[in-house]
Amino acid sequence: MKINQRDIVNVNFQFPDGKLKNHYAIVVFNNELTENEGFVYLVLITSKDYHSQYFYELNNNMFNNFSLP
């Protein structure tokens, strides 16, 4: 399965407490970077409101013709 930048995937994320949990994530790499480094950069998507300095809020206007798999 080929993964491209801006794809939404379901992966096991390891949280700071060491637990693994399935979560949706956005692929934020480009294909050239993946070929050079050999791994994929992902960003966790959550519906929880954490108010963290490390979070970036997404809204519906940021997506074009998008639907979850």
Image: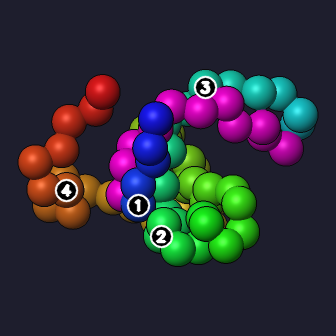
- The answer to the question of whether label 2 and label 1 lie on touching residues, with beta carbons closer than 8 A, is yes
Label 2 or label 3, whichever lies nearer to me, is 2
Residue positioned 69% across, 57% down in the render: 39
Q: Does label 4 or label 1 sit earlier along the sequence? A: 1
Residue 19 x/y as whole percent: 83, 27
Asked whether the viewer can see residue 47, the reply is yes
* Residue marked by disc 4: 63
Q: Mainly helix, strand or loop, the magenta region?
A: strand
Instruction: Give amino acid for label 1.
Output: Gln
**Residue drawn 51% across the image and 31% down it:** 10
Give the crowd class for mark 4: few <14, some 14-19, many >=20 residues within 10 Å.
Answer: few
Q: Which of the two marks, 2 or 4, is nearer to us in this view?
A: 2
Magenta range: 6-16
Mark 4 touches mark 1? (CB < 8 Å): no
Q: Amino acid at mark 4?
A: Phe
Q: Which label belongs to residue 30? A: 2
Q: Secondary structure at mark 2?
A: loop
Q: Residue at x 47, y 70 (%)?
A: 30
Left or right: where does residue 65 sit relative to residue 47?
A: left
The residue that appears at 60% across and 65% down in the rendered structure is 34
Q: Please tell me which of labels 2 and 3 falls first in the chain.
A: 3
SS at mark 3?
A: strand
Distance between the Cα atoms at labels 4 and 3? 22 Å
- Side (left or right) of 9 relative to 40: left
Marks 2/1: CA–CA distance:
5 Å
Report the amino acid beneath label 2: Asn
Disc 1 packing (10 Å; few <14; some 14–19; many ≥20):
some
User: Residue 50: where, in percent of width, then height?
Assistant: 57, 50
